[in-house]
Image (spheres, rainbow, N blue to C red):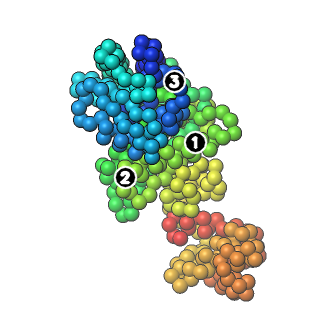
């Protein structure tokens, strides 16, 4: 559709002798002709980022009104960076608005002959967009089914789904990574609104990528994207930016307390999509359980939690040293001891650094360390015992004991 709309915009621009742009209903740019002069900040942002601020969208709709017939004018708003008024025409198919066709007021008034050409072009655009909508629906359904198989348990189905995606060109990236987003409420089940929020987030993330460079799937408790990863040293940072966009779009539509996004490693073979998905989902789960990481986290930043996150909680709980279990059981009155032990171990046994972090005198720190050894039976001068204690505290965080 993009190439056909682009041809339509350029053809109309040549006929009218003025710039033309076509947006979807979110006021996101689909096609535009070359401009004869400098454009304002809104148009520049639309071209560069394929998106405009929500305040601009609201202003457009306030000017467009409910009538989908004829031309309308979007007035200038200096505070929004919209310096040049727009002349708009609704793109409508069978009474459903699919987008807008735009001209710039600075190019001059619209004559009757131009009005007729604009109306015809809007009608042609509506037909193109409707056809793309129908085809897109079929493609998305096929995409969801194949992605479900690609991420599933059955190896033969994963191989078949990977082959079909390549043959049908549903996903054409050379390298990719999985991104998982999940919502959580304190003591509550997820709602239908949460599901809609996840869907909205997926659409926002999809809009940042080429159509064949992202595929998505929704589950009741999380959503997943398999997204193309560009080459270059900033590739992982770009994934974090995408994850941030995803999270912000989800939170804008949900009143849930928390939202976490996990990002798996980059792979080239689609058969590894399940591996990246497992990494991304595990990352989101660890961030939710531990809550010491950023809301958008790369798997490689989990450290030891990546390893511990692969062990069932029941098994982890049995690994706790009995003495450490005793210390944790006294957490109500002995909470400073747990914090002290964690600070001491996180600072590699450096008393000065640990005391500064805890805002206590070194004498007090030494006293607490002696108490910890008495309660746990561990010798903190022993490397093995320090390792047992340190891993035990990480396990306790992961299993919710701390």
- Residue 295 % position (x, y): 52, 55
Q: Residue at x 53, y 42 (%)?
A: 242
Mark 1 or mark 3, earlier in chain? 3
In this image, 246 relative to 116: left or right? Answer: right
Q: Classify mark 1: helix, strand or loop.
A: helix
Q: Which of the labelled discs sits on residue 239, or is there none?
A: 1
Q: Is residue 301 above or below residue 101?
A: below
Nearest the viewer among 277 and 24 is: 24
Q: Which residue is mark 2?
A: 254
Nearest the viewer among 209 and 312 is: 209
Between disc 3 and disc 2, the foreground one is 3
Q: Residues within 10 Å of mark 3 (few under 14, many from 20)?
A: few
- Residue 94 % position (x, y): 23, 23
Mark 2 or mark 1, earlier in chain? 1
Q: Classify mark 3: helix, strand or loop.
A: loop
Q: Residue at x 63, y 39 (%)?
A: 235
- Residue 362 % position (x, y): 73, 83
Measure the alpha-carbon separation of dots 2 and 1.
22 Å
Q: Is residue 83 above or below residue 7?
A: below
Q: Which residue is mark 3?
A: 35
Location of residue 377 (image quadrant): bottom right
Q: Is residue 290 above or below residue 9?
A: below
Q: Residue at x 52, y 22 (%)?
A: 36
């Amino acid at each position: 559709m993009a190439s056909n709309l682009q041809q339509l915009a350029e053809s109309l621009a040549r006929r009218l002798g003025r710039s033309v742009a076509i947006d979807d209903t979110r006021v996101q740019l689909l096609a535009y002709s070359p401009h004869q002069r400098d454009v304002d900040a809104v148009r520049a942002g639309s071209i560069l980022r394929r998106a405009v601020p929500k305040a601009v969208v609201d202003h457009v709709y306030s000017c467009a009104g409910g009538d989908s017939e004829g031309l309308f004018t979007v007035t200038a708003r200096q505070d929004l960076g919209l310096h040049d008024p727009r002349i708009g025409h609704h793109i409508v198919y069978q009474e459903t608005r699919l987008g807008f066709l735009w001209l710039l007021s600075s190019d001059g008034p619209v004559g009757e002959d131009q009005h007729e050409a604009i109306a015809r072009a809007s009608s042609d655009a509506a037909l193109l967009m409707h056809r793309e909508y129908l085809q897109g629906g079929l493609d998305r359904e096929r995409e969801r089914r194949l992605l479900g198989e690609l991420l599933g348990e059955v190896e033969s189905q994963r191989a078949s789904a990977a082959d079909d995606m390549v043959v049908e060109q549903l996903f054409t990236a050379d390298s990719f990574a999985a991104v998982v987003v999940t919502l959580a409420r304190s003591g509550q089940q997820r709602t239908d609104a949460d599901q809609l929020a996840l869907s909205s987030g997926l659409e926002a993330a999809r809009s940042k990528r080429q159509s064949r460079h992202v595929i998505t799937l929704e589950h009741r408790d999380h959503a997943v994207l398999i997204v193309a990863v560009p080459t270059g040293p900033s590739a992982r940072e770009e994934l974090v930016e995408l994850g941030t966009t995803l999270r912000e779009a989800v939170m804008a539509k949900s009143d849930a307390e928390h939202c976490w996004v996990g990002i798996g490693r980059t792979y080239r073979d689609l058969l590894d999509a399940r591996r990246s998905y497992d990494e991304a989902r595990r990352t989101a789960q660890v961030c939710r359980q531990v809550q010491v990481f950023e809301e958008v986290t790369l798997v490689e930043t989990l450290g030891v939690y990546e390893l511990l996150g692969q062990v069932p909680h029941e098994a982890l709980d049995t690994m706790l040293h009995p003495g450490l279990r005793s210390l944790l059981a006294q957490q109500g009155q002995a909470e400073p001891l747990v914090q002290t032990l964690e600070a001491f171990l996180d600072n590699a046994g450096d008393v000065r650094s640990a005391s500064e972090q805890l805002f206590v005198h070194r004498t007090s720190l030494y006293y607490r360390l002696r108490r910890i050894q008495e309660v746990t039976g561990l010798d903190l001068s022993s490397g093995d015992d320090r390792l047992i204690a340190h891993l035990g505290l990480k396990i306790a965080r992961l299993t919710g004991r701390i």
